Image: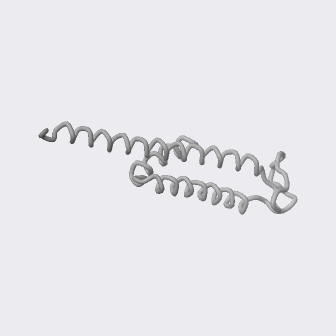
Amino acid sequence: MGGMALVVGIVAAFLVATPARRGWLLVGFGGLLMLASFAFEWSQASNGRDARGCHDCEMFLGRYWQWYLVLFFGLLNWFAWSLGIALGAGERAWLGAHKELQRQRRAPVG
């Protein structure tokens, strides 16, 4: 689950995150995705007394569900996404510096 968020974060940052501000925007976008996932799970949870075989569920925000489990996995994915953003942006910066160094080495001196 977190592995896919890590890979997508790396690819997204490598393609988009040139200035640091874009990287932070991608991290914020990952947070919005986590909140959207939380809201979707809330909307799918039972609101009646029949929790459909869920023995560990509890009432939270008017629904019977395991909100702490959804929050845990959401935060785990957001952390993996953010780590992927950092790795992708770092890789892009390293490649840019490497290309600049190669260009300087080929330039005539004088």
Residue 44 sits in quarter: bottom right
Report the number of discs.
0
* Residue 66 in the image: above or below residue 108: below
- Tell me which residue sits at (19%, 36%) in the image: 105
**Relative depth, front residue between 27 and 101:** 101
Residue that extends furthest to the top in the rendered view of this protein: 105
**Quarter of the figure with the C terminus:** top left
Compare residues 90 and 46 and report the one nearer the observer. 90
Q: How is the image coloured?
A: one colour
* Side of 24 relative to 42 (left or right): left
Q: Residue at x 63, y 43 (%)?
A: 76
> How far from the left and from the top, in percent, is residue 3?
53, 41
Using residue 104 as the reference point, say whether residue 88 is left or right of it. right
Residue at the far front in the pictured view: 110
In screen coordinates, is 17 left or right of 31? left
Instruction: Identify the residue at horizontal 43%, vertical 42% (top origin).
Output: 90
Q: Quadrant of the N terminus?
A: top right
Query: Where residue 41 sits in the image (x, y, percent)?
Result: 69, 57
The extreme right residue here reads 49
User: Residue 18's x, y, as percent?
Assistant: 40, 53
On the rendered structure, is 25 left or right of 49? left
User: Is residue 51 depicted above or below 93 in this figure?
Assistant: below
Give the x, y percent position of residue 100.
Answer: 27, 43
In the image, what residue occupies the spot 33% across and 41% down?
Answer: 95
